Amino acid sequence: MKFRFTRRFGAAASVACAVLMLAPQVAPAQASTLPVTYNVTSSLPYVLQPNKAPAGSNDWSCKPTAAHPRPVILVNGTFATMGENWSVLAPLLKNNGYCVYAFNYGSTIVSTLTGGNIQSIDHVATSAGQLSTFVNKVLSSTGTAQVDLVGHSQGGMMPNYYLKFLGGAPKVHSLIGLAPSNHGTDLLGLVTFAEDLGVVFPLLLPSINIALAFGGLPAMVDQEVGSSFQKTMATKPDTVAGVSYTVIATKYDEVVTPYTNQFLSGSNVTNILLQNQCSQDHAEHIAIAFDHIALRDVLNALDPAHAVAPTCSSVLPLVGG
């Protein structure tokens, strides 16, 4: 789950200045490959271009190979557009031989008023229905029976609603979440604080949530710890049989808190904490999408038979690397 003050990758002047002074890490050049820059600056070409698909994605003539038999669908997080969120992973996957697809979802009146530059903010259940439609489109185009899903933040959690309640499980081989809001967030304790204040001001949190929902931001409410949506999700086990789940989290996450709320339970789950792999990884909620370690974990989850241990090297908060 990403909020306005965190989602505009490079929008804040102070962050942009710091980023531009850093030398981005670029993947080794190969013949006929797309550039892959593990740095938040890679998202800048997509800012204010909400309908621009990330490089390497949405080639509707692509046919999966025997080496990578399933297409990969990328699901962006709250407030982000597909291009901003997947400016690194989409070309990385394409270079590794995958058919890659991305889409915007969850538009509301806020999306319209901002020219489409704010996405993924409608009710999560509604967005899951849009994911279902897109999965069917990709399956039809590629002639495959299943897809793999990779999501960031809300995009790592919302597909599980599709699997649990919309019959998506037979069409999905694996769900890989980067900092997913699986069990909701207390927003660094703000939700809990508002609930505590409810003893004195019982209408405080309900009033805030009503304002968010009617203001075109119901996804924020759905992702709160204890929301009615979270309670609905909890009526069924964390996972669905037959689907492989991977959760990739960072202890420095400032949006989905506590970060342990991201982890899932089940025999078909692999939970990864980045700092257990590399103490130099200081990625937080934004930078995880530009983190060479986290994205190596994604590649490994998609193709475990050819997994490669991530290289431990510095990853910066808000920037990646």
Image (cartoon, rainbow, N blue to C red):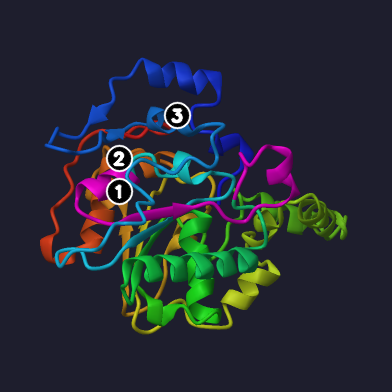
Q: Amino acid at mark 2?
A: Asp
Whole-angstrom CA distance, mark 3 to mark 2, is: 26 Å
Q: Residue at x 26, y 49 (%)?
A: 94
| Number of other residues with Cα within 10 Å of mark 2, as a class: few under 14, some 14 to 19, many 20 or more | many
| Secondary structure of the residue carrying numbered label 3 | helix
In the image, residue 214 above or below residue 135? above
Query: Answer yes or no: do the residues labelled 1 and 2 have beta carbons within 8 Å?
Result: yes
The disc, 1 or 3, on the residue closer to the chain's N-terminal end is 3
Magenta residues span 90-119
Q: Amino acid at mark 1?
A: Ala
Whole-angstrom CA distance, mark 1 to mark 2, is: 9 Å
Q: Amino acid at mark 3?
A: Pro
Query: Percent x, y for residue 28?
Result: 14, 33
Mark toward the viewer: 1 or 3? 3
Residue 205 shown left or right of residue 203 in the figure: left
Q: Residue at x 88, y 58 (%)?
A: 203
The disc, 1 or 2, on the residue closer to the chain's N-terminal end is 2
Q: Work out whether residue 212 or residue 234 is closer to the camera in this orientation and state it.
A: 212
Question: Does 102 lie within the magenta span?
Answer: yes
Answer yes or no: is residue 175 visible: no
| Secondary structure of the residue carrying numbered label 1 | helix
Answer yes or no: is residue 143 visible: yes
Query: Percent x, y for residue 231?
Result: 64, 75
Whole-angstrom CA distance, mark 1 to mark 3, is: 22 Å
Residue 45 tag number: 3
Query: Percent x, y for residue 245?
Result: 35, 70
Residue position marked by numbered label 2 in the rendering: 281
The disc, 3 or 2, on the residue closer to the chain's N-terminal end is 3
| Secondary structure of the residue carrying numbered label 2 | loop
